[in-house]
Amino acid sequence: MPKSKSAYSEPSKVSKPEHHIIVVWVDNEAGVLARVIGLFSGRGYNIESLAVAEVDKQKHLSRITIVSVGTPEVIQQIKLQLGKQICVHKVALFKRSDENILFRELALIKINSSKKNQEKVKKACKKYNSVILDKSKNSFVIQVTALRREIDKLVQTIRPYGLISISRTGAVAMTRGPEVFK
Amino acid sequence: MPKLLSGAEIVFKALEDHNVEYVFGYPGGAVLPIYDELKNHKSIKHILARHEQGAGHAAEGYARSSGKPGVVLVTSGPGATNVVTALADAYMDSIPLVCISGQVPTHLIGTDAFQECDTTGITRPCTKYNWLVKDVNDLAKILHLAFEVATSGRPGPVLIDIPKDVQFKKGPYTINKTKVSKSLNGSKAKENISDKKIDQLIEMMKKSSRPIFYTGGGIINSGPKASKLLRELVALTGFPITSTLQGLGAFPGSDSQFLGMLGMHGTYEANNAMHDCDLMINIGARFDDRITGKLDEFSPNSKKVHIDIDPSSIGKNVKVDLSFVSDVDIFLTSLISRFKSKNKNFVDINKNKIDKWWDQINKWRKKDSLGFKNSNSVIKPQYAVQRLYELTKNKETYITTEVGQHQMWAAQHYKFDEPNRWMTSGGLGTMGFGLPAAIGVQLAHPGKLVVDIAGEASVLMTMQEMSTAIQYKLPIKIFILNNEYMGMVRQWQELLHDKNYSESYTAALPDFVKLAEAYGCVGIRATKPSELDEKIEEMISINRPVIFDCLVDKMENCYPMIPSGKPHNQMILGPEEDKEEVSAEGKILV
């Protein structure tokens, strides 16, 4: 008899996982997020980040942007499984490396430090469309928008200068040019 | 202004409009308004189960054998959690169920009220869709939608959770059936089957010298016409055909082109043909892991074609070369008409091309992989199924099963010539399925013979439903292959866990004959092969429920089998072969 003591077969070779952006248009009804996210957890798919909000008040349409890591086969399954849900109108799938897609994440960063360090932070944030949202004697809250890895790097740079809190959104995505995904 | 109805009345109006004959259920606090309304709707008969799981499986039996959706009615909390197993079972095997559950009043939702649970949350992963109806004005619309979702595309279970206050509240009843606004839901094939693609398939069929049809439950779900068309196609081509567990009966089991079931306990010829073929045409099956075995070595040299109504089934487990997202019925109609018009006398012309293939298949057949050593002193379980088949094959017989060795022996040795005659829990593998399912089958087919081929361990899980069978005078026959073990567990322990029979023996079984009598039905026991026929005939002749306790060989294993992690062409045919392998290993140790 074989060595395996399982009634199931061994996993077979898998291809290389890649980052993908999945955009899902759904009816904004009760439980819709649980339905979409439950599908990911139930079938063992990964979610790296998630952003969701209603984009059409009249039609009650929400747009969910999910960054996921998976093999091409798994990502294709995710798309088809999502597509079967009755609350889902359409599903778009993009590779993160796709040049035609724009991504942005937003982060709010709170700094509490000396004037000197504050200036260093402001300088570092400058190239990421930074906006100061709040100021007090020793602190300020700054908003930046950038790619995920840029924010990761920024946070590393400014952490020694009094960073006390950070809040980040998941990525949102949109295609370049006049076309929209049908 | 239309007349306003209470939520409970709306439920029944919708059931009537969908021609529901039976509701399988169990009352409780949160569904009392619906139960109160039952008396006003004489065309709908309520079948009182003894446990909500039993109600669910009975509804499945009804649906699987009739093709119509089964309707279940349960209360909140434990009522809903008890029905979850049946919903998950129906979801795995694509069976249309409409489950209505009561819920605590809306103002109490989320307060941990008595018998409250998050029913839509719990059932979301095991239903095709579910709804919590918070407004009575949405109720009619959702009920119609629920029936449509359950029965369209790839069928499946749905659940509608109705809070008690919504059942009381008055609202409008609308009859306009809401259409699911999108085609992606796997509703009737939206993909146009282009002639070009069909021609591509026909070309592949003509080129192939080792073709095989691999068919599944999708054909049964597509309806009786699909089974007829399949027979026509197989006859037109002269190709061999094998079926999954769920698809048995779609093609006649007694036909010479049928190679028997494939998969882990499939026949030697079916599995070898799957492994060695050069063209595999999968119609309505899903490349399940019990079928494919080791994926890397699954049918390595074949072109694969997949026809499935669910787009997410295609390419999920196995990459295919050509695919059609379609209802089997529609697909086969297009394929056959195109095939016939272009290929007159195909079978004769193509005979030479696939002759060698059939020779090879017949060589595999000679192995007689379903063969077993019969005995004069002890009833072999395979023999019991064979005798049951021989003595019932001339009647319109419906077979349900539980899950385990007896299920596989039934699939191997009982031959089904018609669809919807074989009801088994394939995907989820639910022990306790067969007895309540038989109740639903008998209701759908009054006067017909319904037999649950059972194991003693499985049947005890839902034994309480015998009481239901008695109440509604349903003469189901529970044919127990009693080996005192959870046979399949014991078999795996013998083969893979050094005969450590951990907890697989039931030390204190009831006396099934006395148990039958306690329920008010008839108990029969067979202990010797010589008395088997006579006792089976006695069972068939009794027009009441029967529990048949058939004492069989305790240590018999189910063969052939594909051991885990092995490809199709490395089957174990029987115990002898096992021993050889073990001793070879022993030699290495020495």
Image (tube, rainbow, N blue to C red):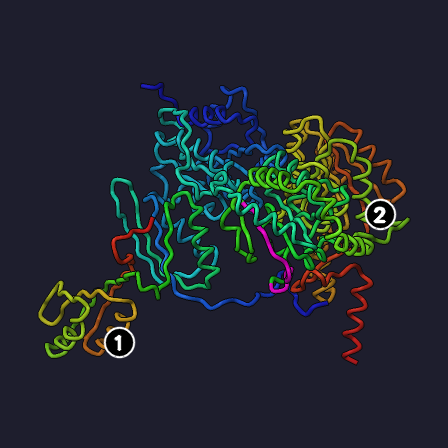
Q: Whole-Å distance between the Cαs marked 1 and 2?
A: 75 Å
Identified at 64% across, 53% down, the residue is B280
Position above or below: B555 against B243? below
**Label 2: how many residues lie within 10 Å, few (<14), some (14-19) or many (20+)?**
many
Label 2: element kind: loop
User: Which is nearer the eye, A63 or B53?
Assistant: A63
Label 1: element kind: helix
Residue B36, horizontal then vertical, whole percent: 47, 24
Q: Residue under circle 1? A: A156
Span shown in magenta: B296-308
The kind of residue on which mark 1 rests is Gln
Residue B270, horizontal then vertical, whole percent: 72, 53
Residue B338 highlighted magenta (yes or no):
no
The kind of residue on which mark 2 rests is Ile
Q: Quadrant of residue B298?
A: bottom right
Residue found at the far left of this picture = A137
Residue B32, horizontal then vertical, whole percent: 46, 29
User: Which is nearer the eye, B34 or B325?
Assistant: B325
Residue B374, horizontal then vertical, whole percent: 87, 51
Q: Residue under circle 2? A: B379
